[in-house]
Image: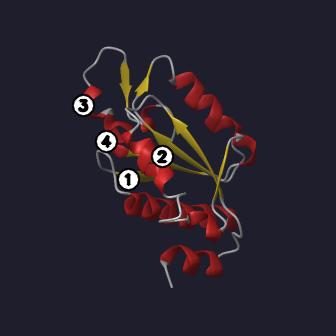
Amino acid sequence: MNPISEFIKKSRIKSPWVLHFDCGSCNGCDIETLAVLTPVYDVERFGIINVGNPKHADVFLVTGTVNHRNKKVLKNLYDQIPDPKAVIAIGACGLSGGVFREAPNVVGGVDKVIPVDVYVPGCPPKPEAIIDGVVKALELFAAKQEQ
């Protein structure tokens, strides 16, 4: 049995919903993130659904570097997700600003604006690493639910 199905069976989470926000990436991380929804990885079979409305999300998955223009949108989306919630920063840009970190318009990684629970490094990270990050975030989400 794979780690996602084991976790979902053990936890009270029946259908975790994920909001994906591209905060200004080159789309490498976005392509790998969306790959987990394809038939090859098919995380939807475990009830994990990519949603477009932050008010329905349990997990906030962010790719790309944060700049002065999109930091307000990032914070606004974060504030709309109901508590408890988990945040995942994907890729080198989401973690630190990546190769763009020295640019004058770049604030840095996602954690410069909102709290991050799980970091998934890579440029871009592999879909398996993203799935592992989601599993870790769901564990944190379940622990926050119990509090």
How is colour applied across the structure in the image?
Answer: secondary structure
- Label at residue 36: none
User: Can the viewer see residue 117 in this picture?
Assistant: no
The residue lying at 56 percent from left, 65 percent from top is 43
- Tag 1: amino acid: Val
Q: Quadrant of the C terminus?
A: bottom right
Residue type at numbered disc 3: Val
Horizontal side, residue 87 vs residue 45: left or right: left
Q: For the point 51% across and 24% down, which residue is it? A: 71
| Nearer-N-terminus badge (2/3) | 3
Q: Could you tell me how far apart the alpha carbons at marks 4 and 2 are, in whole angstroms?
A: 14 Å
Q: CA distance from mark 2 to mark 3?
A: 20 Å
Specify which label sits upstream in the sequence, 3 or 4: 4
User: Mark 3 falls on what kind of element?
Assistant: helix
Which residue, given by chain and number where applicable, does mark 3 sit on?
A: 99
Q: Is residue 134 left or right of residue 128?
A: right
Mark 4 lies on residue:
92
**Marks 1 and 4 close (CB-CB < 8 Å):** no
Cα–Cα gap, marks 3 and 1: 16 Å
In the image, what residue type sits under mark 2?
Val
Q: Quadrant of residue 112?
A: top left
> Disc 1 marks which residue?
120
Nearer the viewer's eye, disc 2 or disc 3? 3
Q: Nearer the viewer, mark 1 or mark 2?
A: 1
Among numbered discs 3 and 1, the one appearing first in the sequence? 3
**Quarter assignment of residue 84:** bottom right
State how far apart marks 1 and 2 are (Cα): 11 Å
Depth check, front residue: 76 or 14: 14
